[in-house]
Image (cartoon, rainbow, N blue to C red):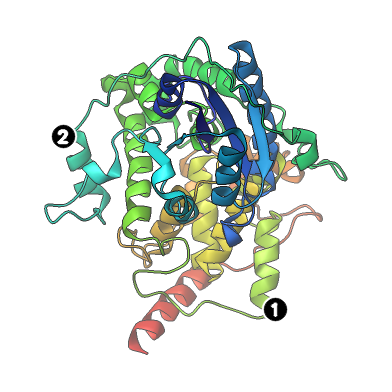
Amino acid sequence: MTAILWFRQDLRLADHSALLAAIGEGPTACLYVLDDDTPGDWRIGGAQRWWLHYSLASLASSLDAIGGRLILRRGPAAVTVAAVADEIGATSIHATRHYEPWWRAADTQLGDRLTLHDGDTLVAPEQVQTGSGTPFKVYGSFYRALNEQLPPPRPEPAPKHIIAPATAAKSDTLDDWKLLSTSPDWATGFSDWHPGEDGAQGRLADFADEVADYATRRDRPSEEGTSRLSPHLHHGEISPRTVWHALRGPAADKFLKELAWRDFSRSALLGQPHLPSKSTRAEPQWRTGKPADDDFTAWTRGRTGYPIVDAGMRQLWATGWMHNRVRMIAASFLVKHLLVDWRRGADCYWNTLVDADLGNNSLNWQWIAGTGSDSSPFARIMAPLSQSAKFDAAGYIRKWVPELASLSEPDIHDPVVRPADYPQPLIGHREARERALSALANARSG
């Protein structure tokens, strides 16, 4: 019997139930399909493609070391997987269960040929549901139910050997896919990242020494207080339960709740597949037309005149990542100060983040916009200038907005006298707040 292990967002060997199941059946063909068709508008963006190139290279090397071979194909996932199965005479297909709508559509197309295994969450969302058997819509209730099923099972070791099928399937090369930026090479600032399973394990080991300070340092963008595990988790280079067991204990509670939020985002996608595009609650009348478009462009380029927002957007373009506290500040500024539709912001993050995760990205944008089933009220408008000072972002601003580097505190958070090459604020905070609240009131009365 020959089996196929269909890799998706689980690019690792350790703690991989689907891989172990496939190997247990006999010779195993390891397959990755680059599918730009089935996801539609949610095909992966440039930053994720950069990461994917190096993650696949790492995975191919790891498979080669234990006798396996990574087959690369491009096309609609379900059709391509089925074609490879027919080509090599595979009798079964194994994969990790994912919750994005396009993966679920592909799973359905493959039907009984496909066996799905858990591995992308601490606990399968189907096991964390309300008394009526539906996904939770509020995180607090979800977390309490999830907590009753923790700890998760201990991670399984990586296999030591794979038997390759007698019939070799043809494969693309990574270079065929042209995933890396070339003209121009906009990813030169990505060099601090180390995609792949070894990079994920190394980052986890480093963070294990830092996690005790996570709760106090995570909101300070000038410090390296976050885990930076998110892109590794998103691409499945390390499993959530591997992280949980490595960090468990009272000192890690705050971070482990972030892992639980990640599980919640999968549950939310399962119960609300419209989450990436449709608001659940009332939303204001978003601004449209050229003035709104110009403001959106200024926001994406880090030219809003609000130093903390601009620093975040410039970090995003330079590194494919943005500090979590600043992500919230920048997102809030777009939807509440500029009254630009949250979907435009979500699309921007999707195309520029190396850790762009459909569930997390959609849930977080709807949370900040006040439009989701579990959201911060729209009327709660984050003040970026006071946030910048409160969380000591001066060093962060100096790094990413160098034209302000010579300013001392508190001027750097809200410069009174600005260098000629730094813009005035697009709108004042008080004016923006009044406009946002008026827009929401008009939407509700209309």
Residue drawn at x 44%, y 48% is 360
Q: Which residue is mark 2?
A: 148
Q: How many marks?
A: 2
Q: Which label's residue is closer to the chain start, 2 or 1?
A: 2
In the image, residue 331 above or below residue 400: below
Q: Nearer the viewer, residue 70 or 50?
A: 70
Q: 227 or 43: which is nearer to us?
A: 43
In the drawing, what numbered circle is on residue 301? Answer: none
Judged from the image, the secondary structure of the residue bearing numbered disc 2 is loop
Q: Is residue 444 above or below residue 419?
A: below
Q: CA distance from mark 2 to mark 1?
A: 51 Å
Task: For label 2, count other residues whose C-alpha is less than 10 Å away and answer few (under 14), some (14-19) or many (20+).
Answer: few
Residue 66 x/y as whole percent: 58, 12
The answer to whether residue 47 is above or below residue 332 is above
Specify the farthest residue to the left: 131
- In which quadrant of the rendered image does the C terminus lie? bottom left
Three-letter residue code for mark 1: Lys
Identify the secondary structure beneath mark 1. Answer: helix
The amino acid type, in three-letter code, at marker 2 is Glu
Q: Nearer the viewer, residue 418 or 383?
A: 383
Label ID, residue 290: 1
- Residue 156 locus on image (x, y percent): 37, 17
Query: Is 97 placed left or right of 334 in the picture?
Result: left
Task: Estimate the x, y position of residue 23 in percent, counting from the top left.
Answer: 46, 21
Is 277 on the left-hand or right-hand side of 263? right
Q: Nearer the viewer, residue 174 or 77?
A: 77
Q: Residue at x 49, y 66 (%)?
A: 336
